[in-house]
């Protein structure tokens, strides 16, 4: 059985944190909210606990985990070397949604890093995550708390739907405030490389340390050996419904909307499938002529933070409504738009340029 404990997201009750920390220390698994998405936490120094994470999620062994620490004073517990720019990035972005790649400390079991010699590390800013780390007094390995490949969880109900009976405890701290996973930056390369866009934008990082590169896509579409970071597989974050991304490569949103309506008419005529639309407040009216479809607005197109926060929950809502196909478009690549586009690309069964 999986226990659920409702907990105050701003002032977590110490007794509940102590209960969760004891589960972690004893080798169990606890799902808890971070500022990005819910994480599935286990003792990062315990290879058996780490293996339980992989088994609970159905995660392949070549996909590494992120190690969560309380603050920079814990870095020597997880890494042997601090590459250039570490101090600057940690001072500016920690605690927060930035994961950094370091050389692995031998104290971190190899299954955390999928057998690799580098380790992904971040210090989360969510009060519940910070309290859990402080009381457990050990690094916590924590990928997203969902079945592998499924849409990431931003609410405790999402975690329960995917992992009930597979984990020991869920700390229900409400909705995650960012709703997209952390940015992963590889500091072992020069210049550093963004392996996964996320809650800290490329522009913010470059303003601080200068040029960074984006990881090149694996042309074969298949992982070669172990991955250096989570979130690098071509298909990931996917709802059970088929997601079709109309990618707005022209920058003209009207073109993308026309493509969605064109595809909508074609699918409805040929297949009689149930359709869902992920859209924004300013564009929802374009689809009012189709009363039989499910429409979810992610917020204002002028507010990428709101769109990012609602993206995964919107996918799950349409999935739970029983739609066969979800149609949506992206929001460019500036700021958080890059992370939103990345998640939509990886969630999509088909990408159509517009």
Image (cartoon, grey):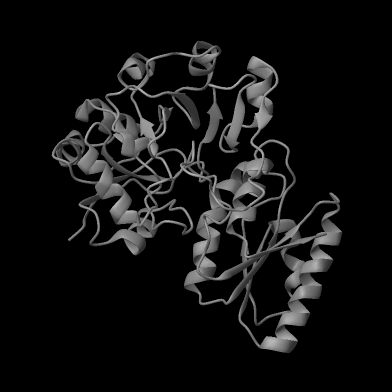
97 sits to left or right of 60 = right
Compared with residue 249, is residue 94 higher up or lower down, i.e. above or below?
above
State the image quarter where residue 123 is shown.
Answer: top left
Q: Report whether residue 111 is seen.
A: yes
Observer-nearest residue: 204 or 294? 204
State the image quarter where residue 42 is shown.
Answer: top left
Q: Position of residue 288 (x, y in %)?
A: 73, 74
Compared with residue 85, is residue 246 higher up or lower down, i.e. above or below?
below
164 sits to left or right of 295 = left
Observer-nearest residue: 87 or 129? 87
Compared with residue 333, is residue 297 higher up or lower down, i.e. above or below?
below
Q: Position of residue 326 (x, y in %)?
A: 62, 69
Q: Position of residue 43 (x, y in %)?
A: 24, 36
Q: Position of residue 191 (x, y in %)?
A: 65, 20
Kindly identify the residue that appears in the image at 49 percent across and 26 percent down. 100
73 sits to left or right of 168 = right
Kindly identify the residue that appears in the image at 64 percent across and 78 percent down. 293
The quadrant of the picture occupied by the N terminus is bottom left
Kindly identify the residue that appears in the image at 73 percent across and 41 percent down. 333
Total tally of numbered discs in the picture: 0
The quadrant of the picture occupied by the C terminus is bottom right
Q: Report whether residue 289 is seen.
A: no
């Amino acid at each position: 059985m999986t226990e659920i404990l409702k907990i105050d997201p701003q002032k977590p009750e110490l007794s509940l944190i102590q209960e969760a920390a004891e589960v972690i220390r004893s080798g169990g698994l606890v799902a808890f909210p971070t500022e990005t998405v819910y994480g599935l936490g286990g003792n990062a120094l315990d290879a058996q606990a780490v293996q339980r994470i992989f088994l609970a999620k159905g995660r392949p062994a070549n996909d590494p985990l992120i190690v969560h620490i309380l603050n920079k004073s814990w870095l020597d517990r997880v890494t042997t070397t601090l590459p250039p720019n570490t101090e600057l990035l940690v001072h500016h972005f920690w605690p927060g949604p930035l994961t950094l790649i370091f050389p692995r400390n031998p104290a971190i079991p190899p299954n955390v890093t999928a057998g690799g010699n580098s380790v992904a590390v971040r210090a989360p800013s969510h009060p519940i995550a910070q309290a859990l780390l402080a009381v457990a007094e050990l690094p916590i390995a924590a990928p997203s708390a969902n079945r592998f490949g499924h849409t990431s969880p931003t609410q405790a109900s999402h975690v329960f739907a995917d992992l009930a009976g597979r984990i020991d405890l869920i700390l229900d701290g409400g909705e995650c405030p960012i709703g997209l996973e952390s940015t992963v930056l590889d500091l072992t390369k020069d210049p550093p490389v963004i392996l996964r866009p996320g809650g800290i934008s490329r522009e913010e990082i470059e303003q601080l340390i200068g040029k960074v590169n984006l990881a090149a896509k694996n042309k074969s579409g298949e992982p070669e050996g172990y991955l250096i970071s989570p979130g690098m597989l071509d298909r990931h974050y996917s709802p059970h419904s088929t997601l079709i991304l109309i990618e707005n490569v022209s920058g003209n949103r009207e073109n993308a909307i026309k493509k969605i309506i064109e595809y909508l008419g074609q699918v409805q005529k040929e297949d009689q499938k149930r359709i869902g639309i992920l859209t924004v407040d300013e564009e929802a009216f374009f689809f009012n002529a189709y009363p039989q479809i499910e429409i979810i607005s992610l917020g204002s197109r002028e507010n990428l933070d709101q769109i990012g926060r609602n993206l995964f929950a919107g996918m799950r809502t349409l999935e739970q409504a029983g739609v066969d196909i979800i149609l949506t478009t992206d929001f460019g690549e500036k700021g958080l738009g890059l992370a939103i586009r990345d998640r939509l690309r990886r969630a999509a069964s088909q990408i159509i340029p517009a």
